[in-house]
Image (cartoon, rainbow, N blue to C red):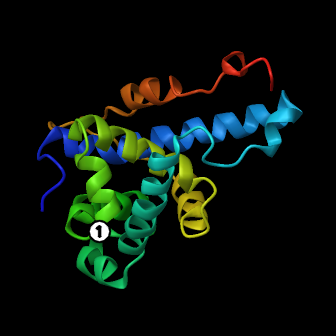
Amino acid sequence: MKLLARGNFQQLLPILFLCGLRFQFSYFRTALNEKNSLQHLGAGHLLDDSLDETCERGLQILMQRAKSRNLRNTLGEFLKPSSNSEWLLLQCAFLELPTKPPVPVIHWIEHGNKETNLIRFSFGMGMRSFWADESRSFVQKMIKKSFGFVNWKGESCASRVKEVMDGFEWSPLWVLPEF
């Protein structure tokens, strides 16, 4: 069963993952600096329960694929030490994600609008990757390196991607009064 659409939408999913990671990091940073009462909340509390569980299961599969020896061997020469090999591995893992998702992930994505659910799923996996044991070291390596964002013409579009990602900043104004 093929879950992901072809073309540009599929290429956006890893970027949405990064946006979720950035959002979670900004939330964590704000919680430490601004509101001590937020520190007790779990990593997935910003996600609804079914999405959180789906993202947890999906992230495990995504990271298994991104870290697999088979994928590294396939990409071989493209994984130069000077490049962000983790980013390339993550993008390739997203391409193969639909071939082996757990059944509950398939059911969650197919319930309602698939594209909307895939956006939420990709963003949520990015949020979870900040804390998850299976992804933490992989993500830390990835974010310490530069990202080479280019458009279909081969021109750099890193500044445009940065503008979008800068919009995913958590605000303490969103906290409910009881917190």
**Quarter that holds the C terminus:** top right
Q: Residue at x 54, y 58 (%)?
A: 139
Q: Residue at x 26, y 73 (%)?
A: 75
Q: Quadrant of residue 97?
A: bottom left
Q: Is residue 123 above or below residue 145?
A: above
Residue nearest the viewer, comparing 159 with 178? 178
Q: Is residue 56 above or below residue 168?
A: below
Judged left or right of residue 4, residue 71 is: right
- Residue 100 is situated, as x and y percent measured from the top left of the image, at 25, 71
Q: Residue at x 45, y 23 (%)?
A: 163
- Residue 29 is situated, as x and y percent measured from the top left of the image, at 74, 37
- Residue 35 is situated, as x and y percent measured from the top left of the image, at 84, 29
Q: Residue at x 35, y 48 (%)?
A: 14
Q: Is residue 169 above or below residue 84?
A: above
Q: Is residue 165 above or below residue 122?
A: above
**Quarter that holds the N terminus:** bottom left
Judged left or right of residue 164, residue 127 is: right
Question: Which residue is label 1 attached to?
Answer: 78
Q: Amino acid at mark 1?
A: Phe
Judged left or right of residue 124, residue 179 is: right
SS for callout 1: helix
Q: Residues within 10 Å of mark 1 (few under 14, many from 20)?
A: few
